[in-house]
Amino acid sequence: MHTFYNLLIHLVSFGLRVTAIFSKKMRLFVNGRKEVFEILQREISSTDQTIWFHCASLGEFEQGVTIMEKIKKLKPDHKIVVSFFSPSGYEIKKKTPLADAVVYLPIDTPTNAKKFVTAVHPSLVFFVKYEFWPNYLFELNRKNINTLLVSGVFRADQIFFKSYGGFMRRALKSFDYFFLQDENSESLLKSIGFNNTTVSGDTRFDRVSHQIEMDNTLKFAEDFKGNSLCIVCGSTWPEDESVLLEYINIAPGNVKFIIAPHKIETEKIENFTKQIVKKTVLHSEMNNVNISEYNVLIIDCIGLLSKLYSYADIAYVGGAMGKTGLHNILEPATFGAPIVIGKNFEEFPEAKRLRDLAGLFSVSNAAECTEILSKLILNDNLRNKTGMISGHFVNKNTGATKKILKYLSKFPDKQ
């Protein structure tokens, strides 16, 4: 099975190089990996002590942030290496001050795994949430390096829990400990013989809970909102915007919208703006206008969304209307905002839990979106109660980082 896996990885690698000819994203994916060992050679010396975090993409990086921050204080003599699988994570966070080196993770071949682990030579490794690369895990295990999964999530349909999943179950044995988001994940692991587990929760709760303590003031957002009710639509994709459009165009005059697309693509933003009948302004154009006179503000830049959610009376979080993956619902929840999302969220336990608590609403189409947004706008009690549930949900579920650090204090680095 290992031989077949390695052959498949080489075939996939070749396919990605071909795809890169036609896809900008794939070119970043392929070309960025050409610089990995050059970056590591420049930033990490053979005498450095290092700790390695692997994050699939941006969301997983955010889950690792609180641990990185604590580790930097606890072990200031260690360098932190962060690897990403996805360009959407690497390109945004490649200059993060939390890490001494940020790189793409080379494709999971035995040669790459040996070369990478040797170059980084970590004493401690964190895989965040998921991405289980067998050759890397086998190499870490071979070198007896402490390896932890944090904010882990498992589902019954994954290969680990199938009769033919022995090879991947063997890869899981490389983890010294599993810190999991929910009890279902722990039950699944125990069903295949893994008892080195703790349901610690999601480290993102710790991350977002600190946001409310920060200065979230944005003068332009204050001027735009005024005394109106504000719906902040964060990390939206075209499929999200298509279901929002109907309500945007018919919303009462006392309702304003701040829309922060996930990708800043001029043509798509222009096409969306043309369909909005309300007075609309882009963030890049607002210095030349009286922003308070507008009903819709489109944020055509990055880095503002966490603070913008503090102005939300209601939040729509994108990604779940299509197949791209639901974005972070906890950021608006920490500010006590009722949350609306799309229909595809079964792989996101925090969304399922908050929906069951009645702090979140899922919609499948424009009509449902219009209906629930109308109810939340017109019914102050419903809006306030739902928002209170969201805020309490975050406060109640903090502490994952503390549990992980407690474990580390008991178990020093392997020799």
Image (cartoon, grey):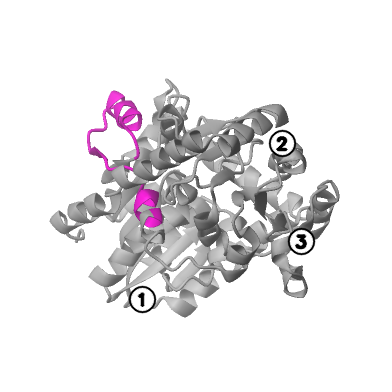
Mark pair 1, 2: CA separation: 53 Å
x, y percentage for residue 207? 38, 56
Q: Single out the mark in the foreground, 1 or 3.
A: 3
The amino acid type found where label 3 is placed reads Val
Mark pair 1, 3: CA separation: 53 Å
x, y percentage for residue 361? 53, 32
Identify which residue, 63 or 52, lies in the foreground.
Answer: 63
Residue linked to disc 3? 281
In the picture provided, is 288 more to the left or to the right than 66? Answer: right
Q: Is residue 386 above or below residue 271?
A: above
In the picture provided, is 21 more to the left or to the right than 382? Answer: right
Residue linked to disc 1? 46
Residue extending furthest top? Answer: 163
Identify which residue, 26 or 116, lies in the foreground.
Answer: 26
Q: Single out the mark in the foreground, 2 or 3.
A: 3
Q: How would you rate the neighbour count of disc 3 (Cα within 10 Å): few for under 14, some for 14-19, many for 20 or more? A: many
Q: Dividing the image into 4 quarters, which one contains the C terminus?
A: bottom left
The amino acid type found where label 2 is placed reads Val
Q: Which residues are magenta?
A: 181-208
312 falls in the magenta region: no
